[in-house]
Amino acid sequence: MALLEVQDLRVSFDTPDGTVRAVRGLSFSVDRGQTLAVVGESGSGKSVATQTITGLTRGAQISGTAYFEGTDLISADAATLRRLRGAEIGMIFQDPLSSLHPHYRIGWQIVEMIQAHDHEISKRAARRRAADLLTLVGIPRAAERIDDYPHQFSGGMRQRVMIAMAMALDPALLIADEPTTALDVTVQAQVLNVMRRLQEEFGTAIILITHDLGVVAEMSDEVIVMYAGAMMERAPRRDIFYRNHHPYTQGLLASLPAQSGKRLTPIAGSPPSLINLPKGCPFAARCPHVFDRCRVETPPATDVQGDPRHQSACWLDHNVTEAVAS
Amino acid sequence: MTEALTQPVTQPVTQPLLRVRDVRKEFPTHGREVVRAVDGVSLEVRKGETLGLVGETGCGKSTLARCIAHLYDVTSGSVEFDGTELTGLSRRAMRPLRREIQMIFQDPYGSLNPRRRVGSIIGDPFAIHGISAGAERKRKVQDLMEVVGLNPEHYNRFPAEFSGGQRQRIGVARALALRPKLVICDEPVSALDVSIQAQIINLLADLQKEFDLTYVFISHDLSVVRHVSDRIAVMYLGKLVEVAPTEELFQQTRHPYTRALLSALPVADPDTADSREQIILAGDIPSATNPPQGCRFHTRCPKARATCAAAEPGLDPVLDDGPAHRTACFFPLTIGEDLSTAVPDLKAS
């Protein structure tokens, strides 16, 4: 059984301009020890989906289910969610500075977090554990630095502190929302390396939300490509890059800078408004393969070449992938 | 673009458009210390080429750009543009030259005044330089909007009514209004989604051809820089560590920092991602108030030796490189050298 099983998740927000349908019928699952990458551009709903699962979208209208080890996170009460968050589901966000309290020492924040979930543990033991965690994520002289404040750490070091906190209670699932987007590439390489190492050691499942297809290629086992609140394609890593089916996936990959000075192939236009979504496929207006049906009926996600692990929400022939077509 | 690559670089066909010599820019801090953001940089940019400037946060690339655009006064050194020395020029003397050097900024949200209409934002350069007014200015602005791919009918809209990519087009239109010779693009696509990023990169390439522009293109994203640049200069802690024609920099990487930077770049290709050498640098970039002695990279360099801590390497051709490829390193990499297994030894010479 999958560690997390999300079925038909829908999230909308009421705004003065109308109802924003941020996530529209998303289903996916994550297995233990696996990394699921969720890619998509701004406004694709990738962050809202995972925030909803962890109960962090207040004031939204939510439907669907998200079973995590037998508990439905969507219908769970606040106390259950609070117990699961941190202990069973760790989270890291893009900006470590706004996730750490500037007024408290790093060690204090980790100890508080450990003690909030483990009422038995002594302060001294929790502190020792905090120091061990900081060492584990590669912070030099962890025993001394545990008494430093967040501002005394660099961006990369702060993100390591966040990872240490997220991993403090050995969660089964780690949700990392653009964890390295604010970091320089050499620091990003360090942080991704730490995540990989911890996953190997503890068998943590990771949901990695990113806009960076390079990071996807490096880190993921499975990939979901999102657009306008819905899943366009999902497949094992190599299939997304080498045997993709959905024109949006193909458009994203073609947009990437090539090696030489050749002209890039952008996707024309821009994403639709989530308030007034057009009928049919949300990508239809920008799709080079669009035909009449796309503008009328929304395509469901169905198997590509008979492989249930590879699904595409597109009306084009599911027996032809890019590699086969070209 | 390829033309510049094939030209014999030993003999510049024309006078360089921009010549930067030993430029330093220091900023005072609260104490007695100074931040040496740019610390002795020399480079040339030829007419019509794109020079990519890469490096990580705090390496001084944006400060250097602002020194070139005369937005900062340099602490010392010389910036020569089209035969005119810019340092020490009075505001008045600088004014006509400002038209020739323009900047495009990273943040399409922060660099446009939200309360002003797009037409008047793009028309500002005309107003400031007293070039045209009234209906003629409006016509010029609408022409520009058309050139950068905006709908001229949106003249009276506010920035908030445009998407991120369209806003960056507004920034491009404003920069091009006065037909500059040199455009400094400071992370122009970093805030954009990839599909939109590609639109802007193509637009910049088209405009370069159409208006014979010279670009200094700053980015932390090496794949973008590789795509747009004829030559690339790599900065680390206020200094250039390597300058080379683009493909040569990638194929014959000499400086260990350049190699580490290239190896850290995630590639959107699973096969390459699984098989390539990855060099994980230790630690963070040191502070620019108190940079390491000797080679500034020696504290993190896998190949560092005693020499590296004692003396500072000059930026010169190394091994059998031609004059267009310069590297500041005592122990440059040979082709195929494995850096991932190298171990620093600061006692050995």
Image (spheres, coloured by chain):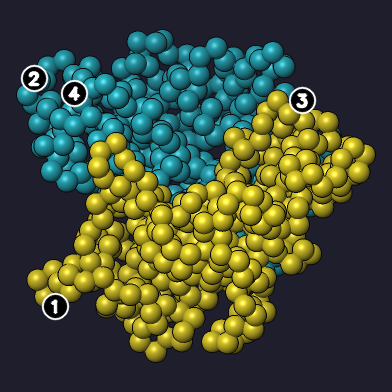
Chain colours: A cyan, B yellow
Q: Closer to the camera, B183 or B250?
A: B183
Which disc, if any, is residue B349?
1
Mark 1–mark 3 CB contact (< 8 Å): no
Q: Is residue A108 visible?
A: yes
What amino acid is labelled 2 in the image?
Ser
Judged by depth in the image, the label closer to the viewer, 4 or 2, is 4
What amino acid is labelled 1 in the image?
Ser
Disc 4 secondary structure class:
helix
The structure residue drawn at horizontal position 34% and vertical position 16%, both measured from the top left corner, is A82
Which disc, if any, is residue A276?
3
Q: Closer to the camera, B271 or B218?
A: B218
Disc 2 secondary structure class:
loop
Q: Chain of mark 1?
A: B
**Up-down relation of residue A81 to residue A239 (above or below):** above
Q: Around disc 3, counting alpha carbons within 10 Å, would you say few (fewer than 14), some (14 to 19), or many (20 or more)?
A: few
Q: Which residue is mark 4?
A: A108
Q: Chain of mark 3?
A: A
What amino acid is labelled 3 in the image?
Asn
Disc 3 secondary structure class:
loop
| Position of residue A123 measured from the top left corner of the image (x, y, whole percent) | 10, 20
Q: Quadrant of residue B347?
A: bottom left
Q: Which residue is mark 2?
A: A122
Mark 2 to mark 1 CA distance (whole Å): 51 Å
